[in-house]
Amino acid sequence: MRILTIIGTPHYGNTRAITDLFLNEFKDEKNEFDEIVLPNDFHEICYGCAKFFFKVFGMTQKNGWNKTDFNYWKNKGWLEGKKPY
């Protein structure tokens, strides 16, 4: 069997750890594994990721910024209207 894993972020976090545990159950000679890491394997951000990104952005604008988020967004130019994709 061929198994494709699509990972939504290059960050190795909880989702990635759970995915690895799940895939370990299928490791044998008969199975082949491929992996796509977004957005590393594509030149543009995925539409679903961008939609989520801007939804979270809207929520933080409404509910207030924390200092870390504010500085990150400001350094990227996203507060001045620059798009992340």
Image (cartoon, rainbow, N blue to C red):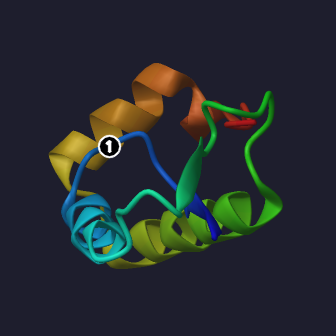
Q: How many marks?
A: 1
Task: Please name the residue shown 73% across and 44% down the image.
Answer: 45
Of 1 and 54, the residue lying toward us:
1
* Mark 1 Cα shell of 10 Å, populated few (<14), some (14-19), many (≥20): few
Residue 68 position (above or below residue 17): above
* Left or right of residue 13: residue 82: right
Task: Please name the residue shown 37% across and 62% down the image.
Answer: 28
| Camera sees residue 71 | yes
Residue 50 coordinates in the image, percent (x, y): 70, 58
| Camera sees residue 7 | no
Residue 37 coordinates in the image, percent (x, y): 56, 43
| Res 77 quadrant in image | top right
Q: Amino acid at mark 1?
A: His
Task: Please name the residue shown 18% across and 45% down the image.
Answer: 67
Residue 73 position (above or below residue 35): above
| Res 85 quadrant in image | top right
* Left or right of residue 62: residue 83: right
Of 51 and 7, the residue lying toward us:
7
* Left or right of residue 10: residue 24: left
Residue 2 position (above or below residue 55): above
Instruction: Assign the N terminus to one quadrant of the image.
Output: bottom right
Residue 36 coordinates in the image, percent (x, y): 62, 46
Circle 1 residue:
11
Task: Please name the residue shown 44% across and 37% down the image.
Answer: 73
Residue 5 coordinates in the image, percent (x, y): 56, 61
| Res 18 quadrant in image | bottom left
Of 76 and 19, the residue lying toward us:
19
Of 13 and 49, the residue lying toward us:
13
